[in-house]
Image (spheres, coloured by chain):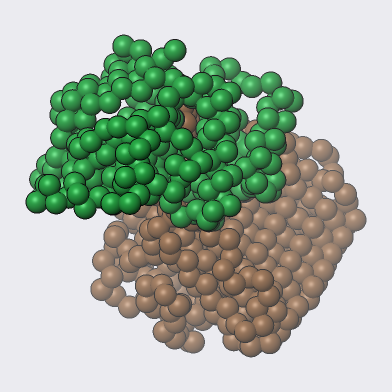
Amino acid sequence: MSTLEIKDLHVSIDTEQGEKEILKGVTLTIKTGETHAIMGPNGSGKSTLASTIAGHPRYNVTSGSITLDGEDVLEMSVDERAKAGLFLAMQYPVEVPGVTMTNFLRTAKTAIDGEAPKLRTWTKDVKEAMTKLKIDADFAQRNVNEGFSGGEKKRVEILQLELFKPKFAVLDETDSGLDVDALKVVSEGVNRAQAENEMGTLLITHYTRILRYIKPEFVHVFVDGKVAEEGGPELADRLEEEGYDRYLNVKA
Amino acid sequence: MSETTTHIPEEKARIGAPSIPGFTEEGEDLSPINDNGGSPLAGASTKAHSHGGGVGVPDSSRAGRPTSTNVDDFAKLTGREEDWRFTPLKRLKGLHTDELTGAAPKIELTGNDIAKLSVVAADDALNGVAHTPDDRVSANAWKYASETHVVTIPKNAEGAKATLRITGESLAAAAQHVIVVAEENSEATVVLDHVGSAVLAQNVEFDVQANARLTVISLQAWEDDAVHASSQQALVAAGASFKHIAVSFGGDLVRVNPSARFTGERAEIELYGLYFADAGQHLEHRLFVDHAVANCKSNVLYKGALQGKDAHTVWVGDVLIQKAAVGTDSYEANRNLVLTDGARADSVPNLEIETGLIDGAGHASTTGRFDDEHLFYLMARGIDEKTARRLVVRGFLNEIVQQIGDEALQERLTETIEEELAATSN
Ligand SMILES: Nc1ncnc2c1ncn2[C@@H]1O[C@H](COP(=O)(O)OP(=O)(O)O)[C@@H](O)[C@H]1O
Ligand SMILES: [Mg+2]
């Protein structure tokens, strides 16, 4: 079992108006096999948390810590974090020119595992995973995310999740922009990864919709760069009915 | 995204040619090198001409550009001329002003023994078979080249392979003249392999006779201090095909001007290019496809990568579809990938169409940046920074490398690209 521990995390970014604090003391512990939902209104800092865990250079950690089984994650470069078993399914996956999916997937898998996958089983694994996620076979020859629709990009993120087998996955609004069918397909992919690899999941979402397919044990409500309330799945049900107004009013 | 595409109504499946999503920057720009005060050098049929969406750079018609073998017919260069405005004249090491009396790089022929190499005098009647200088440096080279190396591919020859290793051994300004004659119905690959150190003005002629198929790879693999201005002109006869691939990565200043003119129908011209500019390097390619006759096809694709401070590339693609050239099918594109800050890619496609009765004509230019978001995405998948860059650049340039039929040469280029990438500092 592994543990990802975030303690009193403060994060700021450089803006034209100077430094702006976005995360104002976030504390959160996830163990492998667990599913945590982070819910919150737009602009509350959810993506900032996700990107900071992955190590995006734009975000400055001013205090606090992130550790993975006691190892200092903040000391690791972006690729080292991925190799250590962290995965971020991005809210807006970028298009990478000139690199085919096939080449990209194999290069990444090799980097993460520290050795090249056996070609025959790898090709089979990729094909199967693509079929299950209803990704067209010809995507393999296309450049990474190039010209993919929003929904296709999200599926390809989950494809990577299934192939790279991380210890912890952060899913940043993977549900947004998906129709019901796609949402089901993507959720099944996440559930498979959890079942097969005992993955710990940090599911970031604005809406409760996806929680019908991926069941969290823990729900954290994020408001203004902090966890405003924590609870079990019942908290999500309450949010479904009441929305975020309660928290925003308290703040005002 | 900065795609400009010019097309006519009949255009088939060319509209919106494959773009490079994620690429955002417009490379087309005015010269940073020579100030733009003067009027462009222009011939009789000068006209203002700009293309949809692009910066309105006035370009004079290629048809009207003066040509002459006499250097005195060209005015002294100021750097403000349309065709010199991007070139740092100070770094030409006198190729445009001096007597080019240095020793020309030595030429050795290797390959199978189908192609023949001979040397003829500078006043031999063969000189000018496919070439007339159209700028001052080219005319200066014409004046000072003391002899001409001629590669002949005999009539009906199949599978001829010839590599001219052109080795520079001095930095004294020199001139050189090379002619490749691909006789009727022959098939050949000719490599011009430029290595060593030189300050060289060069004219290369390609006489591509009826139904011949000639592939030329001009490789600029010079040492860092080389200066090279090469005017390479082809005449392409009926039923012939001419494929020219310019590959430039070595040298301080390299300016290669490939041009090709159709002289007979049902012929095909493909001009490809690949360049990789490092800090301080100036790599310039100005090409010209002249559709002077009907029912011919041309395709142009140049791709370049840039890295390091003051790496500068220039691509100008002139395609002229003359009034007589009905049934023309033509497309040209230039794609640049900027890998670091401080590098600059200028890209100017010029398409002139004098008849509406064509099958298709289009052009595209994109200059994209490999930015932090691309890098972050790949690194977040465990790929280290060096590998990430390599992955992107290799993929980007591979399209051109694949055009090179020769396996050993492909391998050498792939290695070169790796070396260039290893030099990326950040
Ligand atoms: N590059 C940036 N420049 C200025 N403000 C930013 C930038 N990135 C994020 N922010 C601000 O940080 C806050 C949190 O953003 P984000 O983490 O994306 O929230 P969420 O994912 O919850 O919608 C918002 O107020 C947003 O406007
Ligand atoms: Mg967000």
Q: Position of residue B160 (x, y in %)?
A: 82, 46
Q: For the image shown, how many numbered marks are present on the structure?
A: 0
Would residue B378 be found to the left or right of residue A72 on screen?
Answer: right
Q: Position of residue B224 (x, y in %)?
A: 42, 36
Residue at x 35% of width, y 49% of height: A240
Would residue B179 be found to the left or right of residue B419 on screen?
Answer: right
Residue at x 53% of width, y 48% of height: A183
Seen as rendered, the residue at the extreme right is B156
> In which quadrant of the rendered image does the C terminus of chain B lie?
top left
Q: Colour of chain A?
A: green
The answer to which of B305 and A218 lies nearer the viewer is: A218
The answer to which of A169 and B329 lies nearer the viewer is: A169
Chain letter for the part of the structure drawn in brown: B
Whether residue B98 is visible here, answered yes or no, is: no
The answer to which of B363 and B243 lies nearer the viewer is: B363
Q: Position of residue A45 (x, y in %)?
A: 25, 42
Whether residue B242 is visible here, answered yes or no, is: yes
Would residue A122 be found to the left or right of residue B247 on screen?
Answer: right
Residue at x 25% of width, y 73% of height: B37
Vertically, is A199 above or below B70?
Answer: above
Residue at x 48% of width, y 43% of height: A212
> In which quadrant of the rendered image does the N terminus of chain B lie?
bottom left
The answer to which of A182 and B106 lies nearer the viewer is: A182
